[in-house]
């Protein structure tokens, strides 16, 4: 009897995980004004599409995260796999206002690519980037008050010059 009840609970939980709530598709983020959530589609180069999913490579799901309707969470997923590849938070009447809070980006393999925090669309604290194999690429300490930063190599030694933030696609 206990096994039957447990399997029923587990199957109900797993079924609900696959249920998807339909939200409106927007062509531009301004169309999300007044909505609790919205979806926007992009092609393989992350260029916005007028609709989806024909030709869509990934999509953003914008969700309000406060009762005043000013804070948003944006999560970008790959259409084909459902893999999460970007998570950011915004403050403003529509998503895409000021970046605020923790931001993470992943490679399509699921490996973390970038990890940082924003305040008023400026990087604060530590910016970390990673190679596709998971090894640290860049560690930069940003000081918004002074406008200076320092980069470290994978061994923790200071670098004379910070490398570019985006890994080369060569």
Image (tube, rainbow, N blue to C red):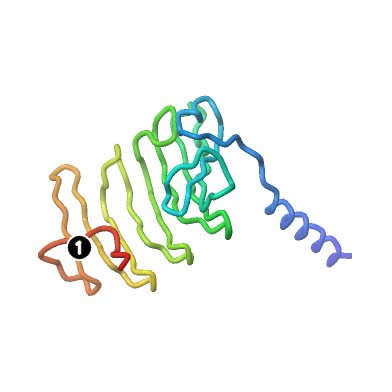
Q: Residues within 10 Å of mark 1 (few under 14, many from 20)?
A: some
Question: Which quarter of the rendered picture does the C terminus lie within?
Answer: bottom left
Q: Position of residue 147 (x, y in %)?
A: 15, 45
| Residue toward you, 58 or 114 | 58
Taking the spot 84% from the left edge, 60% from the top edge, the residue there is 5
> Could you tell me how many numbered marks the image carries?
1
Taking the spot 42% from the left edge, 42% from the top edge, the residue there is 89
The extreme front residue here reads 55
| Residue toward you, 167 or 104 | 167
Residue 71 relative to residue 6: left or right = left
Q: Position of residue 83 (x, y in %)?
A: 53, 59
Q: Position of residue 110 (x, y in %)?
A: 48, 64
Taking the spot 43% from the left edge, 62% from the top edge, the residue there is 107
Q: Position of residue 132 (x, y in %)?
A: 38, 69
Badge 1 is on which residue? 163
| Secondary-structure class at tag 1 | loop
Residue 38 relative to residue 45: left or right = right
Residue 164 relative to residue 39: left or right = left
Taking the spot 34% from the left edge, 69% from the top edge, the residue there is 131
Write down the quadrant of residue 99 in the picture.
top left
Question: Which quarter of the rendered picture does the N terminus lie within?
Answer: bottom right
The extreme left residue here reads 160
């Amino acid at each position: 009897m206990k096994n039957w009840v447990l399997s029923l609970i587990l199957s109900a939980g797993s079924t609900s995980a696959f249920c998807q709530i339909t939200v409106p598709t927007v062509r531009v983020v301004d169309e999300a004004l007044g909505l609790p959530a919205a979806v926007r589609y992009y092609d393989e180069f992350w260029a916005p599409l007028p609709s989806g999913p024909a030709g869509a490579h990934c999509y953003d799901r914008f969700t309000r995260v406060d009762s005043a309707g000013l804070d948003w969470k944006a999560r970008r997923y790959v259409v084909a796999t459902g893999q999460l590849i970007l998570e950011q938070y915004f403050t403003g009447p529509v998503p895409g206002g000021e970046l605020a809070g923790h931001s993470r980006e992943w490679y399509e393999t699921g490996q973390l690519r970038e990890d940082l925090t924003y305040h008023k669309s400026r990087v604060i604290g530590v910016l970390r980037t990673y190679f596709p194999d998971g090894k640290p690429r860049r560690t930069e300490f940003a000081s918004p008050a002074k406008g200076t930063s320092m980069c470290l190599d994978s061994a923790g030694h200071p670098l004379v010059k910070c490398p570019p933030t985006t890994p080369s696609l060569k």
